[in-house]
Image (cartoon, helix red, strand yellow):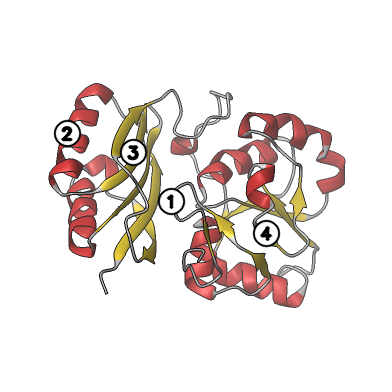
Amino acid sequence: MTRVLNISAYLFTPLDDLAGLREVLRARAVASGLRGTIVLAEEGINLFLAGGEEVVRAFLDDLRADARFAELTAKESWSPSQPFGKMLVKIKREIIRMDRPTISPAAGRAPAVSPEQLRRWLDAGVDDDGRDVVLLDTRNAFEVDYGRFDGAIDWRLERFTQFPDAAGAARDELAGKTVVSYCTGGIRCEKATIHLRELGIDARQLDGGILGYLEQVGGAHWRGECFVFDGREALGADLAPRA
């Protein structure tokens, strides 16, 4: 059976000449037969691609040969067919819109928790210092409705730009606790966690997001499916597409 490799990756890294970079990446992706979406902004790159394993890995290797993208890491999953209809490369103001231009993960990343460490904390019910661990879902409400971690806080966001106001309103509720924010692949939490810490909240981000957690430690403490923005719609805890 033919299998399609799906990758999700992002990196906050200063970029210029976005128009030229867009043309180079689009030509390279189309020539390789890849489909998906690449978003470019002055703050970095965000991409979702699918295709044959060899061509996907070759595309990533070529991308990492550019020093600006050398640290790019990808989450992987598989599908029996191509989940994207076309290949798009877009230029936007932000690779993940928050409308808080002073928040710059490229200038300094917030602390992260590995999937293995988070599972250990959730198994124990507390962090390594014995403090309560609070999981905070930073995704939009319709995504949360597909699935989430047990007991996670859900602010019923309609869009990510609402996150800062919601965080400010919940500041007292989160004070004194170890807060771990999470999202699908980790990109929203790069900004969300910085903002939480600016509010004085002891927050960390789940490294690699839900997809990284499911890939590395499985579905412990996870309930339901993980919504993805492609033709698969949602993935199970085993990262298999919805039937």
Q: Which mark is residue 231?
A: 1
Q: Note whether 62 is above or below 1 in the view shown.
A: above
Pinpoint residue 126: horizontal percent, then vertical percent: 77, 69
> Which amino acid is tagged 3?
Ile
Pinpoint residue 17: horizontal percent, then vertical percent: 24, 23
Q: Which mark is residue 24?
A: 2
Q: Earlier in the sequence, mark 4 or mark 3?
A: 3
The residue lying at 73 percent from left, 36 percent from top is 199
Q: Earlier in the sequence, mark 1 or mark 4?
A: 4
* Element on which disc 4 rests: strand
Name the foreground residue: 215 vs 131: 215
> Which amino acid is tagged 1?
Gly
Q: Quadrant of the N terminus?
A: bottom left
Q: Earlier in the sequence, mark 1 or mark 2?
A: 2
* Element on which disc 1 rests: loop
Circles 4 and 3: CB atoms closer than 8 Å: no
Crowd around label 4: few <14 · some 14–19 · many ≥20 (10 Å)? many
Residue underneath mark 4: 148
Residue underneath mark 3: 38
> Which amino acid is tagged 2?
Val
Q: Say left or right for 240 vs 218.
A: left
* Element on which disc 2 rests: helix
Pinpoint residue 173: horizontal percent, then vertical percent: 86, 45
Crowd around label 3: few <14 · some 14–19 · many ≥20 (10 Å)? many
- Distance, label 4 to label 2, CA atoms, is 38 Å
Crowd around label 2: few <14 · some 14–19 · many ≥20 (10 Å)? few
